[in-house]
Every structure is written in C-alpha cells, then in structure tokens.
Image (cartoon, coloured by chain):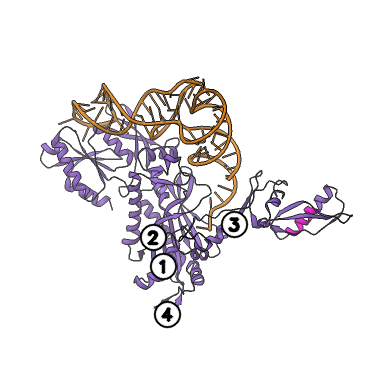
Chain colours: A purple, B orange
Amino acid sequence: MSTPAASAEPANLMEAVVSLAKRRGFVFPSSEIYGGLNGFFDYGPLGVELKKNIRDCWWNDMVRRRDDVVGIETSIIMHPKIWEASGHVAGFSDPLVDCKVSKNRYRADQLFWSPIVITSPEGVTAIHGYVSALENENTAEELQAAAELFKRKKAIVGTLAPVQPKDFTEATADEVAKIPSPATGNPDLTPPRAFNMMFQTNVGAMTDASSVAYLRPETAQGMFVDFKNVVDTGRVKLPFGIAQTGKSFRNEITPRNFIFRSREFEQMEMEFFIHEDDDWAKWHRYWIDWCTGWLKSIGLPASHLSEYDHLKEKLAFYSKGTTDIMFKFPFGVQELWGIAARGNYDLGQHEKASGVPQAIFDETSKKKFVPHVIEPAVGLDRIFLATLCAGYAEEAVTDEKGNTEQRTVLRFSPRIAPVKVAILPLLKNKETLTDRAKALYKKLQRRYAVFYDEGGAIGRRYRRQDEIGTPWCVTIDFDTIEKPGDTFTLRERDSMAQRRVTEAELFALLEEQVY
RNA sequence: GCGGCCGUAGUUUAGUGGUAAAACUCCACUCUUCCAAAGUGGUCUCGAGGGUUCGAUUCCCUCCGGCCGCACCA
C-alpha cells in the first residue's frame, strides 16, 4: 500500500499555485483571448465552487448561526454623496506628481514653486527661471533663498522680486516643463495626475457632471446608510451587527500578486454596532478572536496566521484601533482581515451629510446616541488565495515496489472543498459496478457537490481528485456487489488510507464534516 | 506610473529569417480487481497590431499581458 512521505513546498510555491489554478480550472485571467485585462480575473468551474463554499461558510457562521447579526445586500452604485461623506472622494482626488529621474512622488498640492522675477537696472522685468520646494512652515523662505542663490550663481544683475508661492496644481503646462524637481534641480516632473481609486460611471443617459456616480470601493457604506432601515424593521437590539458580501471595485495603480490585489474583488464585511458606553476594546478583541477561529475552521493553519496592530499615529483620527489578521503568503506576510474600531465616525458623517438623525434610543440607559462600530472586513478572493497557498503540497509517495513518485495535493478543509466526494467504479466495463456507482452518485448529488469518474485507472482518478482537493473518494468494487453489507472503499485524501464504509456511514461522515 | 527581465499547446519547456517540437495533461477506443499501468488513435500552439523582407514565430516599433524592484495602497 502506498503512503505519503515527506511533503515539501515547491521552490516557487506561487508559480505552482497559479499554474494549478489555471490547469484545473480555478482561476483564469479575465478576457484572455483578447490579451487579458490587468487586475481582473475569472473563476472557473472549480474556482466558483470553492469561492461559493467560502462565502457560504462565512454567511452561515456570521449571520445564520448568530442571533446578533443580520444580513443585507445593497447596490453597487449608490448615491454619490455617500462617497463624499465617507471621505472616499476627497481622499483620492489628490493629484500626484512624479519626478521622472529620482522616481520620487509628490502630492501636487504640497509641492510649491515660484517664478524667479528679476527687474534689470534698465527697468526690464522678466522671468529668469523657477524654484520649487516641498510644503513646510518655511516654504516661502526656502523659495526665496533658492531664488537668491539662482540669481547669484547666474550672476544676474537687478532686483529680485519676492517669490509668489503657488502649488503645483496651479502650474500651466508650460510652467510644468520648466519647474525644477526638488530632488534633482532639473525640470524632471510630470504634470499632476489624479489618482482616484474609484471607478466612475454615469447614471442616466446624460453624461454630464450631475450624473457622475461611482462603483463602490467597499461594501461597508451600504451597512451604514441602511442602518436606520434595519433598526426600524429588523427587531435588532444593541449590540448587533449588519453583514453583507459583494463585489467592490478599486482602480488600483498596480494590481499584483495574482488575485491578492485586483481591481474587482469580493468583500465580506460586517459592522457590529455597540453602545457608546460599551467597552469597545473588549468587542474589538472578541472579533479578532472570532475571525481567527473562523479562518482555522476553514482549514488555514495557525502557523500562517498572525496579528498586526496598526500604529496609533498612523490611524485616521476617528479610529480607536485597527488590528489586521495577517497571513503568510508566498510573497510575504500580508493583510487578510482587518478589524477596525471606528467609533461612530461613519454614522456621524452620514447624519451630517444627509441631515437624517442616526441616533437610536436605548431603553436601559434612557439615552439617545449614535452607536459605535467594530468592523471586521475581509476580502473573499484573498481567503481563496490563502486556502490555495496553504493547502498546496507536493509529496513523495512510495508504492509497494519501492518506487517513489510525486503527488500534488490540495489539502482543503471538507467545509470548502469544491468537490466533497468522488464516486469511482473500480472498472468501467463492468455494468454491475457502474450501476451501483451511478445510483450512489445520484443520491449524494442531491445534497453535496460530488463527482462521478469512470475513466482510466483507479490510481489516476485518485490523483486527479487529490489535485483538486477532494477530501474523499468512494470506490465501488467487487466486494460492494458480491459480499453482504453493501460497503464501499472510502479513500481519504491526506493519509491515502482506505477503509470500508456503508452508505449510512458515508452520509454520517459528510453530515459531520461538511457544514 | 517608472525601471529591468519576459511572452511558443491546458501545463512545463525546446527550436528556427523558408508555414514548429517534446514530455505530461486532455478526449476516444481496447485492456485493466485499488494509487498518475499499457497499447492505438485524436484535439490544441508562436499574445495583438504595424514595419523591414520575396518570405517574420524569429529582426525593429507600438500596444497588451506576466514577473521583480521603486512608488502607491483612503
């Protein structure tokens, strides 16, 4: 009997995972026959099952199996004022300027410049050049000093006018071509370019400024703007959460690392509202632990998980604390799940911007207040990638004759595996075997994602299932039909061990492991 | 967005200024009583566009895509 021996991560795990994802139909590049589109991906037959399973697990555990969280689904395009109130419009309208030589990047509104205006002894006033400086308390003085230095170096005679500091957004194309980069002293700067990460579109037939709308860059705002609706209709009491899963869109400058950072992705977010006097730190910790436990429940190993507390100084002013659950990807330890304590900033902003009060009345404290919120937000595509990276293994397998071969296996948790059981008749050309196998297949199919395969040798079929992460194979053999008891061979993926089970035992196993 | 490297079948790779190949995969048939067996047959390929040339997968340019580094990441 064959047994798996030492397993090793391949030299380039990421390459192996991307290759397997393509080969077995988990993830394809989007629009591939047209050359692809950077930052977009399609999910293939197995990928869509895996993704749905992860999403369903999250929904079941987060919403259905809890008494204090309800689910919603909000629209992808929402009122443009939502994104002004949330800070997403302002936060991303900053035009940026690149220095083509030093590769430094500046915010155009923080890069100041002035023409060097000198009046000659003959009374002729002219612009002799330009100076630039980054914004600080002494920007004007720095510009003045630079202008004087310029005049002295070039030995220009005349009277230097006081500098007129302007920021780079006010520079004309002609001036952009002449203003020196603070890094090089030469005119190496690009024109200011706006980097707004939100995708824009227009609502209605008219494409004027009044019709501009955005594809949501996060699903969270849906929970905030529907807060009152849920409170008024949902029979909810603090503390409680509102959850949703759905697509979000960010026009990332550099999508990278396969599906880790893409331009269209799916989020699973929950806003947990608490009393303003409640202990936010306690709830924050509670949700960090809950999320960590959930990740383990779908098969991510504790050894790959860690926590990262954002530095207080770097947090937004309203934030009380943010902790990221990190995952050890092949390309580094990266953020998987962010758990943010956001105070009552979001509801407060929408109250101000919409004019609709968001405060609720609390019966116990007889107080009216805007609730505070803890936000666990995670990217479904990132978890998808994490399960692929963590589950991928190449093992050396030694058979009875002592030959060693490699097998590739995806060690998915039964909860998320795209195929739960493969039904395999031992031989294709024995109708008694295939008939029994097909009957079992039809029966299992009503409740579980199962796969029927009769092509090729049994060993090949086992390995094929290993590679797509199927936890169990059931083989209908001659003992099944010739001996009493109607038992099958149950072959387990990770250990490759086999034992005989009845149909009832098989269903019991699935009932316990697949939830 | 900048710089460097790269783009040949589903995957991993070879190769060429004269119409492209191997292995594995995949499909079909035969055979097969438990771990990628064997035999036979079969499908599929030079990222896109332009230029040079009698002729371009090969040389040049542009675009698209990928990897790495920088920057960015509310």
Helix, strand or loop at label 3? It is loop
Cβ–Cβ below 8 Å for labels 2 and 1?
Answer: no
Instruction: Give the CA distance from mark 2 to mark 3.
Output: 30 Å
Which quadrant of the view contains residue A485?
top left
Q: Chain of mark 1?
A: A
Which of the two marks, 4 or 1, is nearer to us in this view?
1
Marks 4 and 1 share the same chain? yes
Tell me if A323 is positioned left or right of A417 in this view: right
Which numbered marker is on residue A244?
2
Helix, strand or loop at label 1? It is loop
The residue indicated by pointer 4 is A366
Instruction: Give the CA distance from mark 4 to mark 3.
Output: 44 Å
Which numbered marker is on residue A385?
none
Q: Chain of mark 2?
A: A
Tell me if A140 is positioned left or right of B71 in this view: right
What's drawn in magenta, residue-wise? A134-147
The numbered mark, 4 or 3, whose residue comes first in the sequence reads 3
Q: In this view of the protein, can residue A355 be seen by the observer?
A: yes
> Is A140 in the magenta?
yes
x%, y% of residue A479? Answer: 14, 36
Tell me if B17 is positioned left or right of A19 in this view: right
Instruction: Give the CA distance from mark 1 to mark 3.
Output: 29 Å
x%, y% of residue A328? Answer: 45, 46
User: Which three-letter amino acid code belongs to the residue tagged 2?
Assistant: Gln
The residue indicated by pointer 3 is A94
